[in-house]
Image (tube, grey):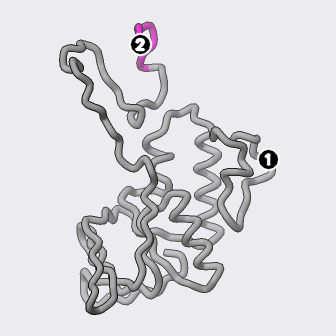
Amino acid sequence: MGSSKLHQNDANCVWVDGPIIVGAGPSGLATSACLTQQGVPSLILEKSDCLASLWQLRTYDRLKLHLPKQFCELPLLGFPHNFPKYPNKHQFISYLESYAGHFSIKPRFNQAVQSADYDHILGFWRVKTQDSEYISRWLITATGENAEPVIPDIPGINKFNGSVVHTSSYKSGSEFKNQRVL
């Protein structure tokens, strides 16, 4: 939640003093931290049950950053000095968790945004999740560029007898040991 003050009008309607940020990945965390440093409260809504869900749930085990760490660190708090030049998945996740702790960022987890509508008359955003409505003057989307897998329509795929796995489901090659794969 960062430093946001929430005002519960009824059981399902919440007024947010600062921006609503959708997504608790690197961009959502960085946005919340920068706002907090400027004295602006915010609230992060995250559809999954953890920070950086794409990193934690949809990446393969041996993943490493493809750029040196100085190009991937978030504002206001760099990587630990003992991290290698190219941190691995688990190091990056621990960095993001430390970052959230350092800035007291506490997203509301399991809050999948179902709609976000701007009320032109009142000048407020109404952001609805499965169990609540959040109202704020500002909305920031930080859902990531790879939030949903894109599966192309491949002619003849239904005739292929092997398994087809999207990269978001791939964790390691151990399940394919002693098989011919592409």
Looking at the picture, tell me which residue is in the foreground, 132 or 160. Answer: 160
Q: Which image quarter holds the C terminus?
A: top left
Left or right: where does residue 182 sit relative to residue 112? right
User: Which of the two discs, 1 and 2, sits closer to the camera?
Assistant: 2
Asked if residue 178 lies in the magenta stretch, the reply is yes
Q: Residue at x 29, y 72 (%)?
A: 116
Q: CA distance from mark 1 to mark 2?
A: 37 Å
Q: Disc number at residue 181?
A: 2
Q: Where does label 1 land, which residue?
A: 82
Which span is picked out in magenta?
Answer: 175-182
Q: Residue at x 48, y 26 (%)?
A: 172
Q: Is residue 162 magenta?
A: no
Asked if 52 appears above or below 166 in the picture, the reply is below
- Provide residue 128's location: percent of width, then percent of height: 26, 72
Q: Secondary structure at mark 1?
A: loop
Q: Going by the image, does 74 lie left or right of 121?
A: right
